[in-house]
Image (spheres, helix red, strand yellow):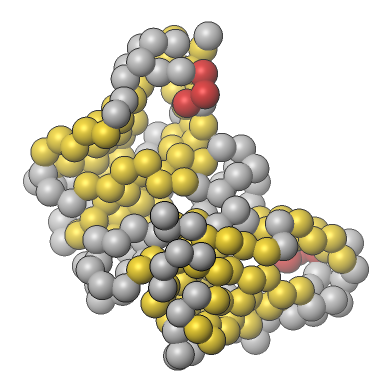
Amino acid sequence: QKEVEQNSGPLSVPEGAIASLNCTYSDRVSQSFFWYRQYSGKSPELIMSIYSNGDKEDGRFTAQLNKASQYVSLLIRDSQPSDSATYLCAVNFISGTYKYIFGTGTRLKVLA
Amino acid sequence: GAVVSQHPSWVICKSGTSVKIECRSLDFQATTMFWYRQFPKQSLMLMATSNEGSKATYEQGVEKDKFLINHASLTLSTLTVTSAHPEDSSFYICSAREGGALNQPQHFGDGTRLSIL
């Protein structure tokens, strides 16, 4: 059974700090990795995707992928109270389908 | 770009009613759409994968006769919850992806909150 694991949190950080969210997955043969943000009562929205080892930056967000260690992380710089949400990690394993395996999500609280 | 519209956003109905939920990709063609279900404080649970012009692929434990999926065009998929009961009350979310590479992300609709009385 392929799995994607995240710490459920809550992760509390002060406003302006860097929030670091981590995700590990169980299968080395994986293709694509995605981070989604989900506000309470809303549907997920795509933040970033990453496919190759290393860092990928987009504004205040940086995704980091290390396939050898089987983890993907999301850094949020200059965290704002509006970043308070649940962050979902999704992995598309190479299996001939396009479906994701989602982690259970990490709840982030940014304290003003 | 990549907008997915889901309708209705909220449904309250009596037990035994069938409910249809629509999912549309507004500015791209979606060869594959997905239907998820989410209970409070839990993660997304994939119910089925819907491919245009073919039968949906259901996940283990999901009753295909209970949750009917139709993906009749490249921009529309529907989920019908047949003879809904209170235990079917949940947040249903669709997503869609453009065709092509595995790297294409899924884009989510706003979800449908279904309450069965």
Residue A76: give x, y in percent of width and height: 33, 25
Residue at the (43%, 14%) spot, across then down? A13
Quadrant housing residue B2: bottom left
Q: Is residue B59 left or right of residue A48?
A: right
Q: Is residue B11 left or right of residue B73?
A: right
Quadrant housing residue A100: bottom left
Residue A6: give x, y in percent of width and height: 37, 39
Q: Nearer the viewer, residue B39 or B50?
A: B50
Residue B90 in view (yes/no): no
Q: Nearer the viewer, residue B101 or A97?
A: B101
Residue at the (14%, 41%) spot, across then down? A66
Quarter in which the N terminus of chain A is drawn: bottom left
Residue A48: give x, y in percent of width and height: 31, 43
Circle count: 0
Relative to A84, say whether A65 is above or below.
Answer: below
Relative to B69, say whether A5 is above or below.
Answer: above
Residue at the (25%, 66%) spot, across then down? B102
Residue at the (20%, 60%) spot, across then down? A31
